């Protein structure tokens, strides 16, 4: 059994001496920026990114702020082929304890992405684990375009069309990507 | 507590300190090895020790009162919040007429009124607003916080003062101890963090379970609970209706809007239980605070602070948990440090010539016996010196490769940098993130002289 002695106590008499020393030396130190453990982990994730060929990344705030960044996915197969879809990532200092916040910037006709850009991807919410990383999320977002699914709908109408009439769904996706109305909603061109 | 309107006269001075003086002036079997019992010990603590309390909420109010009544006379308190009417049931230093005023200022004033001789300096600001040196003036930092982010920040600041000698042993006088309290409903914890000796907050961050997040599609399609309806209004409906206007959880109108939307949705799906306070709780991720839990945890924390400065008993090793949900259960667990911790660990000591370029430094890491790290990316205090990937960042940092590290690190003689890359571990290359202490050969004395000259 471990005894308590490994914890050092503060020595009051040392404090008395230290007080004098500190007031003499404190003035010369330059202020430093604190980097959170989350920021370091994000740096590592970013430096190890293995982006799919159809995905590009950019850092609007420059090389020293990686906590917010953007990616663009250009699917090379499936319903959304040749479209171009932007996503913003906001990473908190508690990353990877907390998942990144991801929003779709491009208005898209998609069963799992709503018109406000909310994305239904399990690893961004209920299934997030700290062992996952930015690469996993980008992979997951890519999957949404090759395999949209009608089981986790955020855009209810799009999901119903995909389930009941895939041909019509395909036509709707084409029309939205070319810039046009699907139902009452206008989608700006993104292809 | 007695009603504030019928306050009993405060005890006379000698009576108030009787028990504390007994504790500090008598020898014992469970004391720290260096404990020197003396009738003057309480005065020494009052005169020479400065303690910072981070947070002036439920725990912070208790902590200030407990520390003031434990012989600490020089206290500071930092909190960015103002008093809300919903705080009054447990944040007992505040009165109805204080609503809207800064918590730190009111809490400091109230404790000073009740405990004579105590000086409390309030800081009404964010913890990040203070210079790092501000935190260095305290012998102990006591945390009464409710967020992981804030704890993690203070932890990194306090651990940042820790220095290691050339044998990777922590230098005791640079260790800034923290006492961390936390409560959630009927559960709580109190822990002592002695950087370099006991695990820091980051060493066992996994102790804090991630917040439960409902799938967005469940919220949108198949809500089953009151919380689902509230999160729908908060995460989906708000943006749909208020394009571009960010939701502010501290704005009562915003909260009221979420509440009424959630209520409508609950009616639509035949779900009951949506109330205004549940809405606040879900949106702000608040578990109802229990006054008695705060009192118990705060008492444990104040006692640990007293033990640290006096040695009148041995410190808790190192994590006390309390559960008052069924009966009362208190347990102490000794967690272990992560010796590779990026925040409190020593890192690997690297000696470098002032002429070594970043590119030579990166090559050197490949051969360094303790690292064997290839393809290293290098960062220093938020400044990304070199990023191997992605291409856009590689291009933005490439020009640094030919510059001497000494110049990139602004002529400091001794610097902490972080590197990530593929390092060897048991014969396998694994992706790793490491802390390095870079010491430039032959410049230590010169830079020390510079510091003294400029001050
Ligand atoms: Zn640590």
Image (tube, coloured by chain):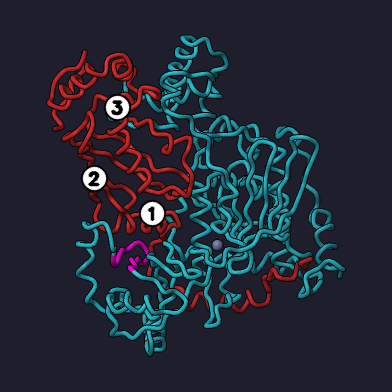
Chain colours: A red, B cyan
Q: What label does residue B153 carry, if any?
A: none
Q: Are marks 3 and 1 in contact (CB under 8 Å)?
A: no
Q: Chain of mark 1?
A: A
Q: What label does residue A55 carry, if any?
A: 2
In this rendering, is residue B210 above or below B254? below
Query: Helix, strand, or loop for circle 1?
Result: helix
Q: What label does residue A42 carry, if any?
A: 1
Q: Which of labels 2 and 3 is toward the front? A: 2
* Residue B142 shows in the view: yes
In this rendering, is residue B254 above or below B339? above
Earlier-in-chain disc, 2 versus 1: 1
Residue at x-position 69% and y-position 68%: A7
Label 1 residue near ligand 1, CB within 8 Å: no
Left or right: residue A181 compared with residue B336? left
In this rendering, is residue A88 above or below B207? above
Which residue bears the numbered disc 3?
Answer: A116
Mark 3, Cα crowd under 10 Å, few <14 / some 14-19 / many 20+, is many
């Amino acid at each position: 059994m471990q005894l308590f002695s490994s914890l050092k106590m503060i020595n009051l008499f040392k404090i008395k001496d230290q007080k004098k020393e500190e007031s003499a030396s404190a003035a010369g130190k330059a202020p430093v920026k604190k980097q959170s453990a989350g920021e370091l982990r994000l740096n590592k994730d970013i430096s190890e990114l293995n982006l799919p060929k159809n995905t590009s990344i950019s850092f609007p705030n420059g090389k020293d702020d990686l906590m917010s960044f953007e990616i663009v996915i250009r699917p090379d197969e499936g319903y959304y082929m040749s479209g171009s879809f932007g996503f913003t990532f906001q990473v908190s200092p508690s990353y990877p304890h907390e998942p990144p916040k991801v929003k779709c910037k491009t208005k898209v006709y998609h069963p799992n992405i709503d018109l406000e850009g909310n994305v239904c991807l399990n690893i961004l919410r209920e299934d997030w684990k700290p062992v996952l990383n930015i690469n996993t999320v980008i992979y997951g977002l890519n999957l949404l375009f090759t395999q949209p699914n009608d089981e986790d709908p955020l855009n209810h109408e799009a999901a119903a069309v995909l389930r009941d009439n895939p041909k019509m769904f395909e036509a709707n996706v084409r029309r939205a990507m070319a810039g046009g109305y699907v139902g009452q909603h206008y989608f700006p061109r993104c292809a | 507590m007695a009603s504030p309107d019928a306050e009993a006269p405060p005890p006379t001075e000698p009576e108030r300190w009787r028990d504390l003086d007994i504790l500090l002036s008598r020898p014992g079997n469970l004391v720290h090895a260096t404990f020197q019992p003396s009738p003057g010990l309480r005065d020494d603590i009052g005169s020479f020790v400065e303690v910072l309390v981070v947070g002036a909420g439920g725990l912070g109010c208790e902590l200030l009162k407990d520390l003031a009544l434990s012989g600490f006379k020089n206290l500071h308190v930092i909190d960015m919040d103002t008093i809300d009417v919903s705080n009054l049931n447990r944040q007992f230093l505040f009165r109805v007429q204080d609503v809207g005023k800064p918590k730190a200022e009111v809490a400091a004033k109230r404790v000073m009124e009740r405990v004579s001789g105590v000086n409390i300096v309030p800081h009404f600001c964010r913890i990040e607003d203070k210079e790092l040196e501000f935190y260095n003036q305290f012998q102990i930092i006591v945390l009464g916080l409710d967020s992981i982010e804030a704890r993690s920040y203070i932890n990194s600041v306090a651990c940042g003062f820790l220095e290691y000698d050339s044998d990777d042993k922590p230098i005791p006088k640079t260790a800034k101890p923290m006492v961390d309290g936390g409560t959630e409903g009927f559960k709580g914890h109190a822990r002592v963090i002695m950087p370099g000796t006991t695990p820091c907050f980051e060493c066992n961050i996994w102790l804090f379970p991630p917040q439960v997040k409902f799938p967005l599609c469940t919220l949108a399609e198949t809500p089953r609970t009151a919380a689902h309806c509230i999160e729908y209004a908060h995460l989906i409906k708000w943006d749909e209706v208020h394009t571009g206007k960010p939701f502010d959880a501290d704005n009562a109108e915003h909260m009221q809007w979420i509440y009424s939307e959630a209520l409508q949705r609950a009616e639509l799906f035949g779900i009951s239980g949506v109330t205004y306070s549940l809405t606040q709780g879900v949106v702000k991720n608040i578990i109802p605070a229990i006054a008695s839990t705060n009192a118990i945890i705060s008492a444990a924390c104040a006692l640990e602070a007293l033990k640290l400065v006096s040695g009148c008993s041995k410190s808790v090793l190192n994590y006390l948990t309390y559960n008052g949900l069924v009966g009362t259960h208190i347990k102490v667990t000794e967690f272990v440090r992560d010796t590779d911790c990026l925040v409190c660990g020593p890192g690997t000591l690297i000696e470098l010539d002032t002429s070594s370029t970043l590119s030579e430094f990166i090559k050197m890491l490949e051969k360094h016996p303790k690292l064997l790290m290839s393809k290293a990316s290098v960062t220093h205090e938020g400044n990304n010196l070199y990023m191997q990937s992605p291409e856009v960042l590689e291009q933005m940092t490439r020009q640094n490769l030919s510059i001497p590290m000494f110049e990139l690190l602004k002529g400091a003689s001794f610097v902490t940098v972080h590197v990530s890359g593929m390092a060897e571990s048991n014969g396998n290359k694994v992706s790793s993130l490491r802390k390095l202490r870079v010491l430039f050969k032959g410049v230590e004395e010169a830079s020390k002289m510079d510091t003294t000259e400029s001050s």
